[in-house]
Amino acid sequence: MSVKNQFSKYANEYKNHNIIQQIVAKSLVRELKFQPKRILELGCGSGQVFNHISWEVEFYKAIDASSSMCELHPKANNIEVKCLNFDTDEFINEIKNDSYDIVLSSSALQWSNNLSRIIEQLSSITKEINAVLFTSNTFKTIQEITNTKSPILDEDSIKNSFLKFFNCEFETILYKLEFDNKKGLFDYIKKSGVSGEKSLSYSDSKKLYKEYPYNYLEFEVIFVKTISKL
């Protein structure tokens, strides 16, 4: 396993709050070893992954739990966009008779309540999965100061879920997103969508504002590439 440190001073250049998600979506497509024709994407968002695909695809199924995201995703005759939560039976039924060259997922599967179940289902419809997931070490210092637990999966749980059904390559990368001031940093936390539904209490927020020692936020992601089925 290699762990890389990457500093990203993007926060001020882009007035948006998902810059790390955009970086990893681009990396996910760039790292593909072939040009798959039939693709399933889980957590498609508004099309960050799809927009980096530069070749002709035969069929693209894009799944996301957010209807507003599904509305924004590119549409075409060979693209099917479905608004589904991938933890549900409805999702399993939707894909169980399908077949794909690859399954892609960027910044989504870390929210699963039962990742092993999803991977098991995917193993019956594809030989290849390329995914990138945030780990629970994202915002690690914040969790330490406020004594809170991350709502997303930890690195070992993610690895174990994949390794039950596939041989895999893993790479863990720590991104550090720098800010010019604390206000910008704390605004970003609120709007980035990585910390989930949990918001901090007033006293925790105050404590954090006073004690947070860095001018950057930590985002840890794990890149997963399946090599072969078990």
Image: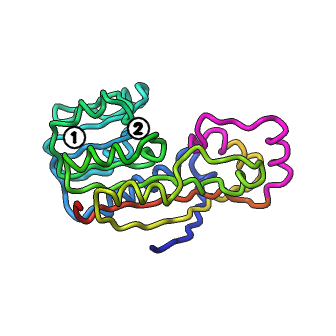
Report the residue marked by disc 2: 45
Q: Estimate the x, y position of residue 45 in percent, counting from the top left.
A: 40, 38
Please report the residue visible at 27 percent of the width from the left and 61 percent of the height from the top: 32
Q: Which mark is on residue 175?
A: none
Q: Estimate the x, y position of residue 67 in percent, counting from the top left.
A: 40, 25
| Left or right: 39 as drawn, with respect to 173 | left
Disc 1/disc 2 C-alpha distance (Å): 14 Å
Residue 59 seen by the camera: yes
Q: Amino acid at mark 1?
A: Tyr
Q: Is the residue marked by circle 1 packed among few (<14), some (14-19), or many (20+) residues within 10 Å?
A: many
Q: Secondary structure at mark 1?
A: strand
Q: Secondary structure at mark 2?
A: loop
> Does the stretch in magenta take in 208?
yes
| Left or right: 135 as drawn, with respect to 206 | left
Q: Estimate the x, y position of residue 93 in percent, counting from the top left.
A: 24, 30
Please report the residue visible at 71 percent of the width from the left and 49 percent of the height from the top: 185
The boundaries of the magenta stretch are 188-212
Query: Which tag, 1 or 2, sits closer to the chain's start?
Result: 2
Report the residue marked by disc 1: 60
Q: Is the residue marked by circle 2 packed among few (<14), some (14-19), or many (20+) residues within 10 Å?
A: many
Please report the residue visible at 73 percent of the width from the left and 59 percent of the height from the top: 215
Q: Nearer the viewer, residue 123 or 61?
A: 123
Please report the residue visible at 19 percent of the width from the left and 46 percent of the height from the top: 125
Q: Is residue 25 above or below residue 73?
A: below
